[in-house]
Image: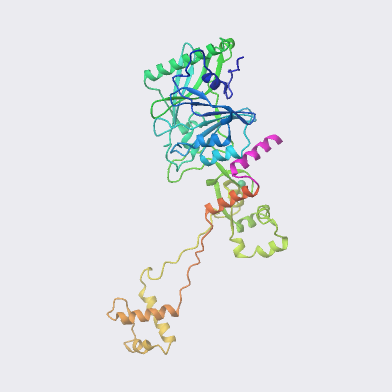
Amino acid sequence: MAFPIEGDGLLDNLFYYVWLKAARDEGLRGFFLPDTVVYKYQQPRSWYFTSIDGTIKKKCKDKLTTQCIEDAFLRKKSESGIVACYIFMSASNNRVIEFFGPEELKHFLNYRKKAQEGILQKWIDPKGEKNSIIQMVWSPKICLFEYRENLKDLYDQRYDMYERAVTFEGEEFHSSSIALRGNELKKHLKNIVELLVMHISEVTSNKLSINRMVLHFKQDKYDNLWLLRATSIRCSEHQNSPLDLNSVIKLPETVNGHKFSTNPQCPMALQKTVLCRNCEEAMEADRMCEISYRMIITAQDGIPPLLKKIHSHMTVDEFEKFRHNPLFLNKQTLVCDQCFLIFTNQWQTSGALPRPQSVPIFGTQPLDPKKTNRRREVTLLSRPENQYMERTVKSSKSTRAFRPNSAAGGEIQLAFTSFRSEIPRIPALNLPRPRTEQQLRGQVSLARMLGTVDITSFLEERYSNKRRQL
Ligand SMILES: [Zn+2]
């Protein structure tokens, strides 16, 4: 029996036919398959891979365990920090791709609810320093190629993983389309795809004859070609249905793909890892702003709902008492930029918190001899027992002898010591403000408290709940 292969979905049956052997077939296809685990009904169903001799193989059923998958996918990790990608069909029937680092992969395998249909694929490093994919539109008569290369250095981990990885999946400004140079490569690709079409036709006794398809290949640093996926396939019996050339693979809702970093020193966060406590929307960490309780209280009457959320046990009486307490008013929390603008709407200033002016350390201020002399005299006069007073007053009522550039170094030192002990400088209260990272950590622990291991999965659940409600 022939499994269906046509359509614009995950098209995971293609991997099955790539692997399936005809008579006297060794399984060499002219291209490689990365380790590809196909999930069906939330369970790993089959695992295809390329063996050392270049043949396409399938793992036996007892290897389809979480531990085996984790071990294989974390072996020989890419220096890009990306270990796998996961493509699945979302509830709204969109093809969605996610990229995993080692931690995300472990979390996915051990804790996450899998989609009904999905493909987990091991990450393959591209030929150059930037991620690239070759899209091939194949038909018996004509072949079209598009080579799309990401703009960011794949190995520069300062950038968000998604910003470095996306090609056809992301916004166009994250990658550039380059003409595929070299007729040899085109000829080779055309050749191997024709052989693959013939092979599929052979193993299905001519039941499946592919007429047109869109394939994604990746070329690695050893110039090997890896078949990543097919995005659209049409068979000859349905000649009239057009090939979906723009069949997009979307990014998950937990990633904001519309951002672009212009400077590696301040890279953008694309993954929404934080919940705004006020609007409860998922946000990227760099969209969170610190806001003082003072501003929140000014913007709203009564106990502001946000403060009620943070201090759930606070009573009205307690709030009335605290609302005049400067320590309470100066406490800060994180809200998203949108909420920040709402809270600070009524303020004359930008809403940015004034930072206390730090007083320079003693001795680094510009010299002001007049002021110093005046103070010194006052000090000395106020201390009649001071042994220096007599001498200072006597010696022409000037304090020149105490000047730092005078020869009487020892006296200066003493005088300064007494002056310092007399009028102690009040140190600037430069109390450290909780750093953004600390606050973010607090947010992650909030997700943990709610019973989820990492916030992305928590957000996912929220999204799916929201969809269910709609
Ligand atoms: Zn918000």
- Residue most toward the left? 407
Looking at the picture, how far across and down is residue 88, in whole percent?
59, 30
Q: Is residue 425 left or right of residue 398?
A: right
Does the magenta run of residues contain 132? no
Q: Quadrant of residue 469?
A: top right
Q: Residue shown at 37%/68% (left/top)? A: 364
Looking at the picture, how far across and down is residue 48, in whole percent?
53, 26
Vertical arrangement, residue 26 with respect to residue 41, above or below: above
Q: In which quarter of the image is residue 232?
A: top right
- Give 402 or 150, whichever is nearer the viewer: 150
Count of marks overlaid on the render? 0
Q: In which quarter of the image is the N terminus?
A: top right
* One can see residue 257 in this view: no
- Residue most toward the right? 316
Give, as a single range, the part of the protein colored magenta: 451-470
Looking at the picture, how far across and down is residue 272, in whole percent?
56, 42
Vertical arrangement, residue 408 with respect to residue 291, above or below: below
Q: In this view, does 291 lie to the left or right of 147?
A: right
- Give 160 or 292, whichever is nearer the viewer: 160
- Give 408 or 14, whichever is nearer the viewer: 14
Q: Is residue 62 left or right of residue 157?
A: right
Q: What main secondary structure does the magenta stretch of the protein show?
A: helix
